Amino acid sequence: MISKELLDILACPKCKEPVRLDEENAGLVCDACRLRYPIRDDIPVMLIDEAEPLAGTEPTDNGA
């Protein structure tokens, strides 16, 4: 589980907007880019190449 303190300082590497935990606590979601960054072994993988588009949406080109 990601601590509140860590979540408060993490930002989307693509657009620099804040991220939030998804419903399953298995990833971090950027609502601006519509991307989900996975969490593996309690470590957020904040790499744009590893991000997955949210279901039913195409990622935007924010900040890239």
Image (cartoon, rainbow, N blue to C red):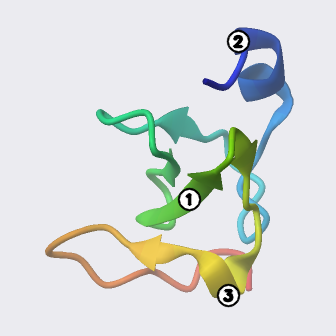
Q: Disc 3 versus disc 1: distance between alpha carbons?
A: 11 Å
Left or right, 53 with respect to 12, comes to: left
Q: Earlier in the sequence, mark 3 or mark 1?
A: 1
Residue, disc 3: 49
Point 82% across, 24% down: residue: 6
31 or 27: nearer the eye? 27
Amino acid type of the residue that numbered disc 1 sits on in the rendered structure: Pro
Q: Which mark is residue 4?
A: 2
Residue 55 x, y percent position in the rendering: 20, 70
Residue 45 x, y percent position in the rendering: 73, 61
Residue, disc 1: 38
Amino acid type of the residue that numbered disc 3 sits on in the rendered structure: Asp
Vertical relation: 1 (above or below) 25: above
- Evaluate if marks 2 and 3 touch, with contact meaning CB atoms under 8 Å apart: no
Going by the picture, which residue comes out furthest to the left? Answer: 56
Residue 7 figure quarter: top right
52 or 11: nearer the eye? 52
Q: Disc 1 versus disc 2: distance between alpha carbons?
A: 17 Å
Residue 62 figure quarter: bottom right
Residue 63 figure quarter: bottom right
Going by the picture, which residue comes out furthest to the top? Answer: 4
Point 73% across, 71% down: residue: 14
Q: Secondary structure at mark 1?
A: strand
Q: Earlier in the sequence, mark 1 or mark 2?
A: 2
Q: Disc 2 versus disc 3: distance between alpha carbons?
A: 25 Å
Q: Secondary structure at mark 2?
A: helix
Vertical relation: 22 (above or below) 35: above
Q: Residues within 10 Å of mark 1 (few under 14, many from 20)?
A: many
Q: Residues within 10 Å of mark 3 (few under 14, many from 20)?
A: few
Quarter the N terminus occupies: top right
Q: Earlier in the sequence, mark 2 or mark 3?
A: 2
Amino acid type of the residue that numbered disc 2 sits on in the rendered structure: Lys
